Image (cartoon, grey):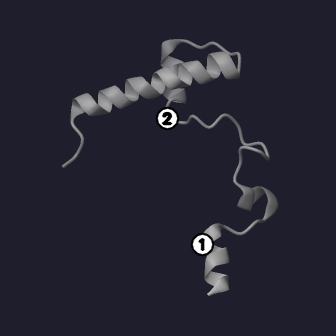
Amino acid sequence: MPPTRSIRRHHSARMRNRAQYVWERVRHNQFDAERYSHIADNLKLCSCWACGNPRRKFGQRIRQEMRSDEM
């Protein structure tokens, strides 16, 4: 059964609030409400070496690949 409209609205509002918290307190940027709803869909702060995908940044293998090589 798909989520109801009220659940989707609840989660959308929750993610907008989180985006506002992250961007105002962590990144020290302030935007208007429309921008927060856009950011809420993509909460990843950046793509630096610490936040990004280690496979893409360092060429490391993922856990599934390591497990399959061991078997």
Name the quadrant containing residue 25.
Answer: top right
Outermost residue, left side = 1
Q: Residue 60: horizontal and vertical position, in percent?
A: 76, 66
Of 33 and 19, the residue lying toward us: 19
Question: Looking at the rendering, in which quadrant would you find the C terminus?
Answer: bottom right
Q: Residue 15: horizontal and vertical position, in percent?
A: 46, 28
Left or right of 38 in this view: 64: right
Q: Amino acid at mark 2?
A: Asp
Of 54 and 42, the residue lying toward us: 54
Element marked by disc 2:
loop
Name the quadrant containing residue 22.
Answer: top right
Of 36 and 67, the residue lying toward us: 67
Quick one: label 1, few (<14), some, or many (20+) residues within 10 Å? Answer: few
Seen at 24% across and 28% down, the residue is 6
**Alpha carbon separation for disc pair 1 and 2:** 27 Å
Q: Amino acid at mark 1?
A: Gln
Q: Residue 64 shows which numbered tag?
A: 1
Residue occupied by mark 2: 41
Image height check: is 39 above or below 71? above
